[in-house]
Amino acid sequence: MSWVGSSAVEIAEAVRRGKVTAPMVVEEHLDVIAERDGRVRAFRTVLAERALAEARALQERADLSGLPLAGVPIAIKDNVPIRGEASRNGSAATPDAPADEDHPVVARLRAAGAVVVGITNVPELCLVGFSDSVYGVTRNPWDLGRTPGGSSGGSAAAVAAGMVPLAHGNDGLGSLRIPAACCGLVSIKPGHGVVPPPEHDWYGMSENGPLATTVADLALALAVMADDMSLATPGESEALGVDSAIDDYPGGLTLSEPLRLRITVAPMPLPSGLSVDAEFQRAVTGAAEVLGAAGHTVVEHPLRMPFGVGAAAVATWFACARDDVNGLDPRGLERRTRSLARAGRLLARFGADGTAGRDRWRAYGADQWFGNADVLVTPTLAALPPAAERWGRRGLLANARANLTYAPATAAWNMAGWPAMTVPYGRHSSGMPIGVQLVAAPGGEAQLLALAGQLEAARPWTRHALPA
């Protein structure tokens, strides 16, 4: 039996019980990476020898039987430190010196038994919703002609292609939820303070989080990253009614009667002038109907987001580019990055870096627009993923137009600091997966996971798309 394609929960349980060894699991996944990644280009670096050495050392650990991620192969996004490896952040201009220490999230994953098998591709400085860079063009396993999204696109492609069951990513304006929706995965951007953030935290908006194929895997990975195992078993909270008595770690999230939430649904939440694909809107409505049938109170949201939210998000995007190029040799930067940073410097002359808009949204806008709901359901994307190309060689207008046309629906919740996630819901007529976005107020991560579990149980999704 091959463990490739198995969930992280299944692999960890098998390793803990001695049904398979960690080195065997890791070797099988490395073989699949060697077979498939030439077409997908999910990885900047595959750490084959190091991963096998880590797996052998893990197998000898005295606490192996108690590790929640025992022997689970995992991929790490190329913008957090990994001890002994360079973090290039998708750029030729960044230092190539190896990191002295793991980022706390990487350290927690390793302490829980996960084995890092590689570092995934990102766009330069993680600035856009694609995943092309000097290290290659990452492609979507569902359609190799399309992008897997970004900036955690390499991580999403690795999971969607079955090369790893779990991957790390982070999300500053949608960089977990966008690639999850592009690749048919489930992912969560936790609220502020739940998981240690990346070093470049984008004005407090960027959060680390996992990408997975099942809700149980996602919950378990988030719990490890947050150092809070109650997130892996949200049934410990009576109000959520989730059954957690499954071999100490959940193999699935089973919901019972006590969970009753007020859910608002917004199939077309964007400001005037922006549109959402009709099939994506129907998916949002369908997901809301499933949740209503499960006993939640579902009401339609009557409003569109104010234009100022989008303007603040764009100004913040440019400001982040301006900040992130500091100290880097511009001769090593791509045209796209230079143009984004230049726009950020220009706006800064007029005091327009998004600060005022972010502050207004955090202070009252998000609450007013969210209303008295527990959870909001919206589209994750507005259009199908664009082509997988070298967008980095193009300028500001081409990249801004493409990003804002297909993925404008996620940034508001980074600015608010609220948890949000993407859940697959059906297939587009093009054959691509569709993702819906669930948003909760601060502290609502367990609610989101519970609702995602209900959607998964009612309408299971295809876990992987093998590259043609």
Image (cartoon, rainbow, N blue to C red):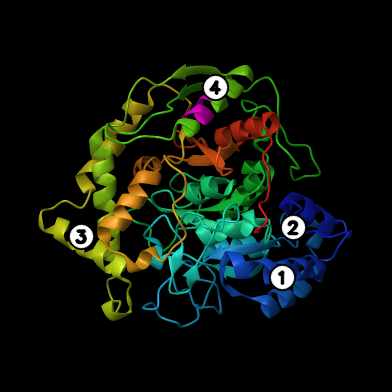
Q: Residues within 10 Å of mark 3 (few under 14, many from 20)?
A: some
Mark 2 secondary-structure assignment: loop
* Residue 295 can be seen in this image: no
Q: Nearer the viewer, mark 3 or mark 2?
A: 3
Answer whether labels 4 and 3 touch (C-beta < 8 Å). Answer: no
Label of residue 343 in the image? 3
Mark closer to the chain start, 4 or 1: 1
Q: Amino acid at mark 1?
A: Leu
* Residue 49 can be seen in this image: yes
In the depicted structure, whether residue 314 falls above or below residue 145: above
Read off the magenta span. Answer: 281-285
Mark closer to the chain start, 1 or 2: 1
The percent coordinates of residue 411 (x first, y second) are 37, 44
Mark closer to the chain start, 3 or 2: 2
Q: Residue at x 50, y 81 (%)?
A: 98
CA gap between label 1 and label 2 equals: 22 Å
Mark 4 secondary-structure assignment: loop
Closer to us: 161 or 91: 161
Q: Amino acid at mark 2?
A: Leu
Quadrant the N terminus occupies? bottom right
Mark closer to the chain start, 1 or 3: 1
Q: Amino acid at mark 3?
A: Ala
Label of residue 67 in the image? 2
Closer to us: 338 or 442: 338
Check disc 4 and report the residue beneath it.
261
Q: Residues within 10 Å of mark 4 (few under 14, many from 20)?
A: some
The percent coordinates of residue 415 (x first, y second) are 34, 44
The percent coordinates of residue 423 (x first, y second) are 57, 39
Q: Residue at x 68, y 62 (%)?
A: 163
Q: Amino acid at mark 4?
A: Leu
Check disc 1 and report the residue beneath it.
30
In the depicted structure, whether residue 290 falls above or below residue 400: above
